[in-house]
Image (cartoon, rainbow, N blue to C red):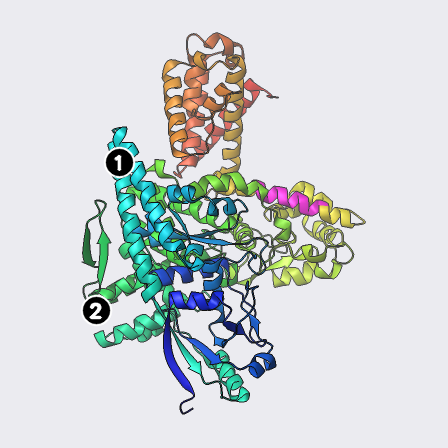
Amino acid sequence: MLNAQKPDHVSLNTLLNRLREGRYVIPDFQREFEWEPWDIRDLMRSIFLDYYIGSLLLWKGRPDNFEALSCEGIYGFDETLRPEHIVLDGQQRLTAMYYAFVSPDKPLPNRANRYYYFLKVDRFMAEEYDEAFNYQWSKGWTQLLENREQQFAQHIFPLSVVGSGGWELPNWVQGYEKYWEERAKEAEELKDLPAERAAIMHAKNARDFGDQLRTLTEQYQISYIELDEELGLDKVCDIFTQINSKGVQLDTFDLINALLKPKGLQLKHMWREASPRLEFVDTDKMNVYILQVMSILKQSYCSPKYLYFLLPGTEKPIREKDGSRRKEILVQSTDEFSVLWSKGVEALERAIRLLRDPREFGAIASKYLPYVSILPAFAAIQSYVRSIDAQQRLDAQRKISHWYWASVFLNRYSGSVETTAARDFQDLKAWITDDNHEPSLIDEFKLRFRNIDLRSERRSSSSIYSGIFNLLVIQGARDWMSGHAPQHDDLDDHHIIPISKAQKVKAGERIHSILNRTPLTAESNRHVIGDQLPNAYLPKLIQKNGESAVRSTLESHFISPTAFDILLRDPFTPEDFDAFLAERQSTIVAAIEYLLIKERIDLSPDLRDLDERVEQVELKLRHLISEALEGEVNRLPPHVLKKVEDRLAGETKRKANFEIDSENPLGQRLQFSDLRELQDTINSKSLWPLFAEKFKSKEALATKFGQLAELRNGIRHSRAIDEITKKEGDAALLWFDRAIGDIS
């Protein structure tokens, strides 16, 4: 196309002015604006960090072409158009810039609310870029936009200031600087030296930030290609079709591969050799995941900008806590890069092997892996644990398991995850080193797991469906025909009430809920269930195998005795289907609490039963003591009270949302006491008369407490438990049950 296209560039300021004036229009054949809120945020981050965001393809238009293509303004524009260019490639980027910088009063597509984009100046100036850029959608945000002082105090720079034009930007920067200069003077008068230093630093940051903004708006260039207005409509449409059907966008892996070639490394060849070892997981991102694992292990971060610091000889700028700067080369040579690559591949291979193990995490097939995107964080933390002292690894694996299941059931890895993966890696390392650094995610899981509505969980909807399936596999769900644990490569998630009966029970989409599905072999599904209701196929199973055996088998599928009885109802009505789903929901939630919240997932079924009985005895003892002491905390033995108060203080410090129970202070403190402290309380000289009638002899009580403690410690600390310990522990449980009796 001779002289038909002209490459050029435009500054950010000029581009925003043209957007505000309605000079860019979108042809009708373009798809709608469809970026997610986080996609817009990531583009803003790229612009502020001076990254290349790609070229635009524009066609200089004429009135007849604007009309022929039914051109409209970009999403959110509602002023009078002054069209100059038809956007052929770059609509999503231009619209994202308009929405973030100009901030039209309109919700994002498929969203109920308007979104506001902002930058945290203090984070940005500290080069904490992953934390600096964000967005909000709450209606109260409009009040913040009208309150400059509140913005200054919170270091919030609305990106709409950039798009306002005129003197808005310099006025904002001057106001921000003045605000912190005044705070510095106030702190100086109060002789508050730390506050004064902080305010002076913020005032300096304001000046530096203003300089960066001025440079950004005036010098950041967006490249574009302009097609001549005389170019025929047919040729322009063909160009657009070629771009959208054959255009291949380079990803991070491709770019790093290109940059490594001059250094003598063929990254694509290395990936071809590694890929067969990782083919269990169905994803086209595994090559990038290897780079992310390498990056996490080397620098604890894995977003695209950090991956480039893995290039041999590349200098990474480091900002120290005192504000000084230095540079560091993370990977010195191509040999070191190759070693690190191998370490990343091995870490992912081990992680996949662990996740698919039916005794560990139960993702027996790729489709049952709750998140592919969790792999880099999971692989990196597992690799880290291999480097710590052997005595710490058991507890470390317990913490990793808790984090993993919390992430699954809270849908933590469902969106953009590089920052999440890096933060989780750092948080887990801190928690493994110090119990007081438990991530807030763990507490959130404990608070929210009961509210999970499993009726709406179908395979495509979230990780929760796969998480429940994984738990069923780990639980040892037995085959309905043989009663044995089947070969796991033969399992699939089959319907308990078959699809053919969905209309009869008015199930709708709930027929596909995880509550109506369970791991079964194809043979069991075909020969046992078929297209029958449970009240038809279960009696046949009972006739051949006995009711006790069938009930026991179905209990291994989280089908409780109550749920079993519901399935046998004849006729089986829509109300019975609802009752079955409700009962299985309750059973599965209870299993999540016991196996994951209370961390009993590694116990064998017989030890789980003993553990539950130990827990019930502990609860009865606490209730008994609370009643006997009439709720008075100070009646506890001094040494017991001190230990309990120390634990309570630690919990308060560790968890921001932890609350002291003023209505039942003794009951709360007894929750933080162990078995031996309960024993010391009952045996204390002043309190023994309150319990003597129930327990008769201190010596007998001490023996039974010893047996119970031995059993409990063996269970809770994953130690081998011999038959004598089991039997003595079982006898102690019976003794306590009889001595204490029922507690209402």
Name the image quarter holding residue 430: top left
Q: Is residue 580 magenta?
A: yes
Which of discs 2 and 1 lies nearer the camera? The answer is 1
Q: Is residue 294 magenta?
A: no
Name the image quarter holding residue 527: bottom right
Residue, disc 1: 196
User: Dot 2 lies on which element?
Assistant: helix
Q: Residue at x 51, y 60 (%)?
A: 36
Marks 2 and 1, how far apart at CA: 48 Å
Quadrant where the image shows the N terminus: bottom left
Q: Is residue 259 left or right of residue 141?
A: left
Res 438 visible: yes
* Total marks placed: 2
The residue sitting at the right extreme is 571
Q: Which residues are magenta?
A: 579-590
Residue, disc 2: 334
Quadrant where the image shows the C terminus: top right
| Amino acid type at mark 2 | Thr
Residue closer to the observer: 122 or 471: 122
Task: Give how far across and how far down residue 27 sits, in percent.
Answer: 56, 76
Task: Give how far across and how far down residue 507 sits, in percent.
Answer: 73, 55
Q: Is residue 87 left or right of residue 345?
A: right
| Amino acid type at mark 1 | Glu
Task: Give how far across and how far down residue 205 sits, in percent.
Answer: 28, 48
